[in-house]
Amino acid sequence: MVNFAPKGEANQSRQYLWGLVLVLCVSYGSHHAKHLISEDNLMLFFLVSIILAALYWGEGPATLVAFLSFLALDFGVFEPRFKLNTPDLQYCISLLTFLGVGYVISRLSNSLRRQASEAQRRAEFSQQLQFFGRDLTLVQTEQDVTDAFERNAGRIFGPQVRLKLGGEELCQVEGADPEYPAELADLLSSFVHQAKLALQRVASAEDLRQAMLVAERERVQNALLNSLSHDLQTPLASVAGSLQVACDPAIHLEPEVRQGLLQLAGEQTERLRRLVSNLLQMTRLDGPGLVLNLQAVPPDELMGVVLEQAPATMRDRIESDVPEDLPDLKVDYVLVVNLLQNLVENAHKYTPEGSPIHISFRRDGDMLRCVVRDRGPGIPAADIPRIFDKFYRAEGLELSGSGLGLFIAKGIVDAHNGRIEARLRKSGGLEFSCWLPYVQE
C-alpha cells in the first residue's frame, strides 16, 4: 500500500539534534580558522549551515541553527570570546539576517519537497493505472477483471477495497473510505471506470463466442444434411433399381444375374445401415455422460466379427495377424467393433481395388495396440493433424462418404482413455494405430 504521509514530518527531534551537531562542527572549524579568515567571512560558514538546515530539515531546525549560529559567533568566535557582547545594531542585523535566510529557504524547500512528493505520488498512481490497464487486456472472464482490480487497486487502497459485480452499473466498490481526499477518490473512480469497460468487453466477447457457436452449429448441421443427401442417394438408387429389376416378372433374368442384383441390394442396404449407425454413434459420442459397457473381449473374436460383417468385396482384402497369447481387451464390445469397421471401411474406400488391408494386434506396455495398414495413395502430410476432425476430407482426392468415420473412431478410443494416431507409410498408404486397455492379470 502506498504511504501518503508527507515526507519530512517524521524524526523531527533527530533533525533538531543534527542541527545542533552542525552548529558545533562549524563553530569548531571557525575557531581554528579565525587566524586565516576574517570575521566577516567566518559568518558565511554559519550562513551556509543555515541554508543546509533549511534545505534538508525544514523551518524549525533551520530557525534553531540560525539562533545557535548567532550565539556561536557572538560568544565563541568574535572577540572577546566566551563573553556576550553588548547588543548593537550590527548584531541585530546579523541575527535577523540568519533568521530571515533560514525561514525563506526552508519555506521554499518545503514547497519544492511537497511538489516533488505530489509529483511522485501522481506518477505512482499513473503507473498503477497503467499496470491495471495492461492486465485488463488479458482478461477473459469477469473473475479475471475482479482479480486484476483487487491486485492493482490493493497496492494503493489496501486489501479491504474490493470490486462487487452486478447491478445496473456492472460493478460497485466495497470497503472504500468515504473520507478519501479528492485525489484518491478520482483515482478510485478511474479504476472502477476501467473495470466497467473491461466487463463490457468480456460480455461482448462472450456474446460473440455464443454467436460463433451458433453459426458453427448451423454450418455443421448444413454440412451433415448435404452429406446425408449425397450419401443416401447412391445406395438408395442402387437398392431401388436392383429390386425393381429383380422383382419385375416381365423381365427375364438368369438366376446368376438376379442373385447378383439381390446381392448388390444387400450390400447397399448394409452401406445405408452403416451410415445411420455412424450418425447414431456421433450423437452418442457428442452427448454428455457416455457410459461404457466394459467387458472382456478376445482380439481374435473381435476380428471374427469384423470379417463376418464386412461385405464380400472387402472381406477378401483383409489380412489379420492376431497372436494367440494376447490378453482380452477391456472395452465396450459394440463401440470397438464399430471402431474397427470404420478403420477398415476407410481403407477399403480410399485404396486401389484388390490391394490388401492388414490388421494386427500387439501388446504395448499396459495397452494393446491395433494397427490397420493400407497401400492407398495416402494424403498430404499437412492434413494428418486434421484427419480425425468431424466432416474433414483431404483435398485433392476423389472421396466419398460423410467424413464421420475417423472422427467416430477417435471418439471411441478417447472414451476408453486410449489414443489413436495416423502416419504415412514409407512404402505408400496410411497406417492407423490405436491403443486400447486390456484385462490385467
Image: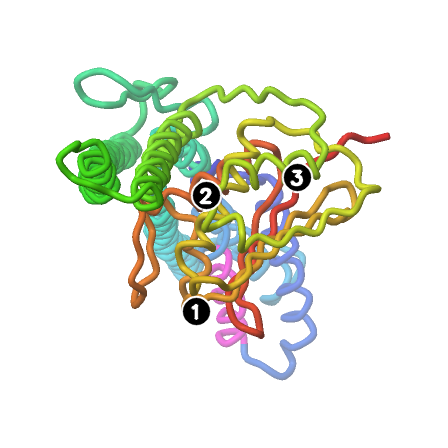
**Local SS, label 2:** loop
Q: Name the residue beneath numbered marker 3.
A: 436
Amino acid type, label 2: Pro
Q: Main secondary structure of the magenta part?
A: helix
Q: Which residue is drawn at the image coordinates 50% and 61% (left, top)?
A: 52
User: Where in the figure is residue 332, as x and y percent of width and height?
Assistant: 60, 26
Query: Extreme left residue here?
Result: 250
Amino acid type, label 3: Leu
Is residue 129 visible in the rendered image? The answer is: no
299 with respect to 207 (left or right): right
Give the class, few, some or many, for how many residues have Cα within 10 Å of label 2's Cα (few <14, many ≥20): some
Identify which residue, 41 or 297, lies in the foreground: 297
Labels 3, 2: front one = 2
Residue 283, compared with residue 166, is above or below; it is: below
Q: Which residue is drawn at the image coordinates 59% and 34% (left, top)?
A: 305
Question: Residue 377, labelled with which disc?
Answer: 1
Magenta segment: 39-53
Query: Extreme bottom residue here?
Result: 36
User: Where in the figure is residue 295, as x and y percent of width and height?
Assistant: 68, 22
Q: Which residue is drawn at the image coordinates 62% and 54% (left, top)?
A: 319
Q: Are marks 3 and 1 in contact (CB under 8 Å)?
A: no
User: Where in the figure is residue 125, as x and y percent of width and height?
Assistant: 35, 45
Q: How many marks?
A: 3
Position of the C terminus by quadrant: top right
Cα separation between marks 3 and 2: 26 Å
Cα separation between marks 1 and 2: 22 Å
Among the two numbered marks 3 and 1 on one chain, the one whose residue lies closer to the N terminus = 1
Instruction: Determine which quarter of the picture holds residue 334.
Output: top right
**Local SS, label 3:** strand
User: Where in the figure is residue 172, as x and y percent of width and height?
Assistant: 28, 20
